[in-house]
Image: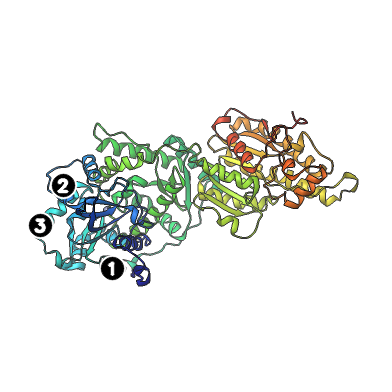
């Protein structure tokens, strides 16, 4: 591990707090130090009030803030003297401690101080840095970890046993450091938890952390690195020989077990496959997590799936409920018994979560955990905390309060959609509307170039270049999308084009055939590929984007109108056929949506002239006299795919501002 300190960047910080935020971000940017909101940092300084009085203040990371992106506003200024008085109390319940920390905060707009605020207050240096460095935790999760760490750091570092975070931990540190010579210390290691470093200067504290962790990494490499044998990953053998379908079935069962749709990801990276090829991979994963604070994201242990994953899922649920019964007190309520990660023998690692951000967190934690397990195994055995200690943290009132603070879930959370023709116009608007409602989206478009694909956050929208007239390309994109998100609940079949005007007497074969291929046949190919996946979906729904031309065609548009009429008829048959599987199939018929790729300014001017109208008049030439945009169509599509229309199939919904030929 090397220091990321950059003098130019550091000099650009105008205040001590800005510099504190800067060196905190250096820690946050290194996933070997902290993951997703883990770790915390602080600065001791002064703050004046309206009356000219100044107080000693601890600026400490706000609860729920992420070191990776923290700025000065992410720190809560708390009255340092008050925190030190709290540290002298014999007992302080954790909820009461959080209330007291809030009371000690000197800015009403500040976030809540970190639960470790009192501990930071006790360390008598201006800067305190705390991480959950993989290397240190891995060493402490192996046999003789304590002796190895004590030997490695000598008198420079205080190595303390594991203790539940919160007030008890602050008390433990206070007791352990009562007679200590702080100036002889560079850090504190909390076994199975992490590391503290401290210094008067920001750089000194940060670089102490880097140096301490670097030594642990070196030690780990010497003791274990060479001994980690990478097994050759065996070829996956999924029961269906199609892992996407098998994963979608597993996701369905997990969602039913947890009570709401969940996302799933199959990690088939070389590391994941190598782990899944180990004979004892399941037993290793069931031993426990890297650090107990991972349990709120991952639960205390992983599931083990065989070729047919469902028995493994049931076994996990049984084991989780037994764990709850073993350690719960009267006031505890059992969380859902669905796993959040697991190893699927020979297939890879499965990560599960309700939303896309949480899925990313679980995937990162799982990756770091299996690496640590392999290293600790090479040192003699992976040792996680015992389950009673894990229970204390998983069901800790403060951890559960963090989850509850996340608020209510959006309508489509945990649901997975596929949208074709997604780079622009109605397709793009549909992706955005589905996202707004909480769904994740596999977005397909034939458009090349990266710009449209990179315009979305890949955690939420997996954008792939795909020609929907090519059945093989559809299959490959679908497979990739399903392995990324876990299944399919919603299909928005939208890709299409509006060919140049051509009367039937002069129509070339190619003109007719190209329109049928894209505007009709491709929709059948996409639907055919999606149906087996939709069967495993949650309230599965298909929405086809047809056209007002079905009911009210215009001269010169035979190729387009005939294809869209065919599409409508196909959708009606699909509604009949798919109903028994619970899949709803509906259509929208938009008209005159001018913010799509079809309508360039020139075409718009030409059509307006043709109808002897001003462009503005032509834009809203419908019964309601209102312009129709992609976002209006997208809202109708999302509604048809959502709960409002959960009892509707085979319906055709005009989105055209009203048209007397249609009505
Ligand atoms: Zn910690």
- Quadrant housing residue 633: top right
Label 3 belongs to which residue? 178
Mark 1 and mark 3: Cα distance apart in space: 26 Å
Judge left or right: residue 409 versus residue 116: right
Mark 3 and mark 2: Cα distance apart in space: 16 Å
Mark 1 and mark 2: Cα distance apart in space: 29 Å
The furthest residue to the bottom: 7
Residue 265: % across, % down? 48, 49
Judge left or right: residue 216 versus residue 435: left
Q: Name the residue located 79 percent from the left edge and 46 percent from the top edge.
A: 607
Judge left or right: residue 500 versus residue 223: right
Label 2 belongs to which residue? 86
Residue 288: in sight, yes or no?
no
- Viewport quadrant of the C terminus: top right
Q: Which of the two discs, 3 and 2, sits closer to the camera?
A: 2
Q: Secondary structure at mark 1?
A: helix
Circle 3 packing at 10 Å, graded few (<14), some (14-19), many (20+), is: few
Determine if the C-beta at disc 1 is less than 8 A from ligand 1.
no
Above or below, comparing residue 148 to residue 262 in the picture: below
Residue 434: % across, % down? 55, 42
Residue 222: % across, % down? 29, 70
For the residue pair 650 and 90, the one nearer the viewer reads as 90
Q: How many marks?
A: 3
Residue 419: in sight, yes or no?
yes
Label 1 belongs to which residue? 203
Judge left or right: residue 454 versus residue 191: right
For the residue pair 372 and 80, the one nearer the viewer reads as 80
Does label 1 or label 3 sit earlier along the sequence?
A: 3
């Amino acid at each position: 591990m090397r220091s990321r300190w950059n003098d130019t960047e550091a000099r650009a910080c105008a205040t001590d707090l800005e510099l504190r935020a800067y060196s905190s971000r250096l820690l946050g940017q290194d996933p070997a130090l902290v993951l997703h909101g883990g770790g915390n940092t602080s600065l001791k300084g002064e703050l004046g009030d309206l009356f000219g009085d100044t107080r000693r203040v601890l600026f400490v990371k706000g609860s729920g803030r992420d070191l990776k992106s923290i700025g000065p506003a992410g720190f809560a200024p708390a009255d340092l003297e008050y925190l030190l008085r709290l540290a002298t109390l014999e007992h302080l319940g954790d909820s009461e401690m959080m209330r007291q920390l809030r009371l000690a905060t000197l800015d009403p707009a500040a976030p809540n101080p970190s639960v470790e605020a009192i501990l930071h207050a006790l360390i008598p240096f201006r800067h305190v840095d705390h991480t959950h460095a993989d290397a240190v935790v891995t060493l402490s999760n192996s046999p003789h970890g304590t002796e190895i760490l004590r030997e490695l750091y000598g008198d420079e570092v205080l190595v303390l046993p594991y203790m539940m975070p919160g007030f008890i931990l602050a008390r433990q540190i206070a007791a352990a450091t009562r007679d200590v010579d702080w100036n002889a210390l560079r850090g504190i290691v909390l076994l199975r938890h992490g590391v503290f470093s401290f210094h008067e200067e920001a750089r000194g504290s940060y670089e102490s952390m880097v140096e301490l962790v670097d030594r642990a990494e070196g030690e780990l490499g010497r003791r274990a690195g060479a001994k980690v044998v990478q097994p050759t990953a065996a070829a996956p053998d999924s029961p269906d020989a199609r892992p996407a379908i098998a994963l979608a079935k597993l996701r369905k069962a997990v969602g039913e077990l947890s009570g709401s749709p969940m996302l799933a990801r199959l990690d088939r990276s070389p590391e994941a496959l190598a782990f899944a090829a180990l004979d004892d991979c399941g037993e290793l994963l069931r031993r426990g997590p890297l650090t107990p604070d991972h349990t709120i994201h991952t639960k205390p242990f992983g599931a083990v799936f065989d070729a047919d994953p469902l028995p493994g899922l049931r076994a996990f649920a049984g084991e989780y409920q037994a764990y709850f019964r073993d350690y719960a007190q009267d006031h505890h309520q059992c969380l859902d018994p669905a796993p959040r990660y697991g190893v699927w023998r020979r297939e890879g690692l499965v990560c599960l979560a309700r939303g896309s951000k949480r899925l990313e967190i679980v995937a990162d934690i799982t990756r770091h955990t299996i690496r640590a397990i392999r290293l600790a195994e090479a040192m003699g055995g992976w040792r996680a905390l015992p389950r009673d200690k894990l229970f204390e943290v998983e069901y800790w009132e403060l951890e559960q309060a963090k989850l509850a603070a996340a608020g209510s879930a959006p309508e489509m959370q945990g649901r997975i959609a596929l949208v074709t023709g997604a780079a622009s116009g109605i397709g793009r608007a549909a992706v955005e509307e589905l996202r707004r409602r909480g769904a994740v989206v596999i977005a397909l478009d034939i458009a090349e170039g990266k710009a449209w694909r990179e315009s979305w956050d890949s955690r939420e929208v997996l954008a792939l270049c795909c020609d929907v007239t090519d059945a093989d390309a559809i299959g490959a994109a679908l497979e990739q999308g399903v392995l990324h998100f876990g299944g399919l609940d919603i299909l928005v079949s939208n890709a299409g084009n509006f060919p140049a005007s051509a009367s039937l007497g002069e129509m070339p074969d190619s003109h007719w055939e190209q329109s049928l291929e894209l505007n009709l046949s491709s929709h059948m190919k996409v639907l055919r590929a999606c149906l087996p996946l939709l069967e495993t979906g949650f309230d599965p729904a298909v929405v086809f984007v047809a056209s007002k031309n079905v009911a009210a065609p215009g001269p010169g548009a035979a190729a387009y109108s005939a294809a869209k009429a065919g599409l409508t008829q196909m959708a009606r048959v699909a509604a009949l056929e798919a109903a028994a599987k619970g899949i709803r199939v509906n259509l929208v018929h938009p008209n005159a949506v001018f913010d799509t790729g079809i309508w360039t300014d020139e075409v718009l001017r030409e059509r307006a002239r043709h109808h002897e109208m001003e462009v503005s008049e032509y834009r809203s030439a419908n019964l309601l006299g209102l312009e129709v945009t992609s976002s209006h169509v997208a809202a109708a599509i999302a509604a048809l795919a959502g709960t409002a229309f959960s009892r509707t199939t085979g319906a055709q919904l005009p989105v055209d501002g009203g048209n007397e030929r249609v009505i």
